Image (spheres, grey):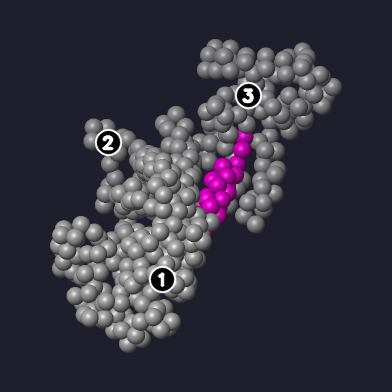
């Protein structure tokens, strides 16, 4: 991911230095486990750990260049690292990687990195959830118009709209917890996964120390259905981001103006039109969501590897693992900040709701007429006739509100009292269940 859309916390997880630290930790833990079993001298395991720790603590660009230099000759990244490590450790390095294969290191390391990334994403989601909860309660009783097909429907609560997004992100958090659990596995089973040259106890020891579970059948690589499930989860979270971003973009439209992104002092909206206040954050989030979702299909295609392993997945994962997690991390933080500072205009919400002359109350009027003894079919006909009369004459000579047209209708006059019509036109009735819904969502 380009630096513009990257945060250092997530970028660091995918840095070469972090990768090599994890590689060393896997190798050192395996040596310690072998020493406990008596497979290698305990003093050698101690030397590997101590000298390796010193080398990793001092790891620099020069070390990275040295590993690259070795890889240029060997054309094998794990062997290049092991050769560099041998230069630092000395003769005892002969016990490093004993009975292991490259995928033992690569796949277990990837599991560690993905769990580290997931932990950071979970923190991001917590901030998003906190922002949404605060704004939902703030506007729990703020009346706004609900829309279906982008057309005014019936009144709702703006806080309830936000609460719906909270519920979605709460589900997404649960999905990510499960996806993290699925990817948090260790595989140190040797060539083709048979443990022919290394005891399963080594794998169990390393897994325990790294906070991972043991892969039940590794076939030399960790099965990629686990990774596919992880990236599918990232894609679903990205879609949740886009759904909220699209809502903000619509609410900020000039014709709507019910809410807008915070406009900073000194911020400019357009190089040509000084009046512009564009929804740049939510538009950016829409774009990032598309990019994150684009990594799902390659992850799914990585599941089908040849026999016990091939490396057709390798180049894909070297790209999608950092890019998807870095992009989602940035997007979640941008979303949280946007919602924390979102500017809301309740007065404009009321004005928009009433801008169609009251026709948005047609549903309750329909029920009111039915309760008054009019058949539903006749009530629908009466209500629609008067609503269309209001709709078609908006801002034209002879315009009458929906209420005025109803009261002048001979099929309504005398059958429904003013007090009952007042209730039908009261937006507050649409907030009756808000507290119960909030209790269901937030408790």
Residue topped by disc 1: 198
Q: Residues within 10 Å of mark 1 (few under 14, many from 20)?
A: many
The location of residue 318, given as percent across then percent down, is 31, 52
How many numbered discs, if any? 3
Residue toward you, 411 or 400: 411
> Is residue 163 shown in magenta?
yes
**Residue 117 visible from this viewpoint:** no
Element class at badge 2: loop
Residue topped by disc 3: 359
Q: Earlier in the sequence, mark 2 or mark 3?
A: 2
Quarter occupied by residue 363: top right
Q: Residues within 10 Å of mark 3 (few under 14, many from 20)?
A: many
The location of residue 242, given as percent across then percent down, is 45, 41
Is residue 267 positioned above or below 251 on the image? below
Q: Residue at x 29, y 80 (%)?
A: 48
Residue topped by disc 2: 270
Mark carried by residue 239: none
Span highlighted in magenta in the image: 155-177
């Amino acid at each position: 991911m380009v630096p513009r859309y990257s945060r250092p916390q997530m970028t660091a997880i995918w840095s070469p230095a972090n990768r090599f630290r994890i590689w060393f930790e896997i190798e050192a833990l395996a040596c310690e486990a072998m020493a406990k079993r008596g497979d290698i001298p305990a003093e050698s395991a101690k030397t590997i750990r101590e000298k390796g720790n010193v080398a990793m603590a001092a790891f620099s660009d020069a070390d990275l260049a040295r590993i690259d230099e070795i890889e240029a000759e060997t054309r094998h990244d794990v062997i290049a690292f092991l050769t560099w490590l041998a230069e630092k450790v000395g003769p005892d390095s002969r016990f490093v990687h004993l009975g292991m294969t490259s995928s033992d290191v690569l796949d277990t390391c990837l599991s560690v990195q993905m769990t580290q990334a997931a932990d950071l994403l979970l923190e991001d989601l917590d901030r998003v959830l906190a922002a949404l909860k605060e704004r939902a309660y703030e506007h729990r009783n703020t009346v706004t118009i609900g829309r279906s097909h982008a057309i005014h429907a019936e009144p709702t609560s703006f806080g309830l709209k936000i609460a719906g997004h909270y519920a979605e992100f709460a589900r997404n958090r649960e999905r990510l917890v499960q996806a993290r659990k699925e990817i948090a596995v260790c595989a140190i089973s040797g060539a083709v996964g048979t443990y022919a040259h290394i005891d399963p106890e080594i794998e169990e020891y390393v897994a325990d120390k790294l906070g991972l579970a043991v892969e039940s059948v590794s076939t030399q690589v960790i099965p990629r259905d686990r990774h596919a499930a992880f990236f599918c989860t990232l894609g679903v979270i990205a879609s949740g981001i886009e759904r909220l971003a699209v809502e903000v973009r619509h609410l900020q439209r000039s014709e709507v103006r019910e809410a807008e992104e915070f406009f900073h002092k000194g911020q400019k909206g357009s190089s040509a039109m000084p009046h512009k206040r564009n929804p740049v954050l939510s538009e950016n989030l829409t774009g990032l969501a598309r990019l994150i979702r684009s990594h799902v299909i390659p992850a799914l295609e990585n599941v089908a590897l040849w026999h016990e392993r091939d490396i057709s997945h390798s180049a894909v994962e070297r790209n999608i693992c950092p890019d998807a997690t870095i992009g989602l991390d940035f997007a979640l933080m941008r979303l949280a900040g946007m919602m924390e500072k979102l500017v809301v205009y309740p007065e404009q919400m009321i004005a928009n709701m009433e801008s169609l002359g009251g026709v948005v109350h047609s549903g309750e009027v329909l029920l009111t007429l039915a309760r008054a003894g009019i058949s539903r079919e006749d009530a629908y006909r009466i209500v629609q006739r008067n609503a269309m009369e209001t709709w078609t004459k908006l801002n034209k000579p002879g315009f009458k509100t929906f209420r005025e047209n109803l009261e002048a209708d001979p099929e309504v006059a005398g059958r429904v009292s003013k007090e009952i019509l007042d209730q039908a036109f009261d937006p507050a009735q649409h907030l009756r269940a808000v507290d119960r819904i909030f209790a269901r969502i937030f408790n």
